[in-house]
Image (cartoon, helix red, strand yellow):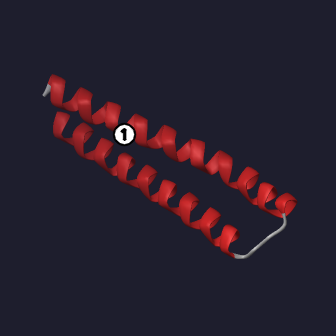
């Protein structure tokens, strides 16, 4: 039972990490495109909710891993 919590948490953490990598790549691509300050700001503001959601997913997954290890 607790093995499922650990592996599920690991999967959530990896999904969150993938989201963070996507956010980084998206902003790097926008920076290399030589956009104006306003356009770059719009891109960053659009990526920000995805970044926060990815961080939350990673933290939630790591908490599940810790709980699974502690109780298992």
Report if residue 41 is visible in the image: yes
Give the residue drawn at x 77%, y 61%: 40
Q: Crowding at label 1, few (<14), some or many (≥20) Cα neighbours within 10 Å?
A: many
In front here: 51 or 5?
Answer: 51
Does 70 sit above or below residue 32? above
The x and y percentages for residue 62 are 33, 37
Look at the numbered disc 1 and give the secondary structure of its residue: helix
The x and y percentages for residue 60 are 41, 35
Outermost residue toward the top in this view: 71
Give the residue drawn at x 17%, y 40%: 3
Q: Quadrant of the C terminus?
A: top left
* Location of residue 42 (image quadrant): bottom right
The x and y percentages for residue 20 are 50, 54
Numbered label tally: 1
In front here: 46 or 69?
Answer: 46
Horizontal relation, residue 56 to residue 9: left or right: right
Read off the residue under disc 1. Answer: 61
């Amino acid at each position: 039972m607790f093995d499922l919590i650990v592996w599920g948490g690991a999967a959530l953490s990896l999904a969150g990490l993938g989201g963070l990598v996507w956010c980084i790549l998206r902003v790097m691509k926008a920076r290399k495109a030589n956009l104006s300050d306003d356009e770059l700001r719009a891109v960053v503001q659009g990526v920000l909710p995805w970044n926060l959601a990815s961080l939350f997913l990673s933290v939630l997954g790591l908490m599940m891993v810790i709980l699974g290890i502690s109780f298992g």
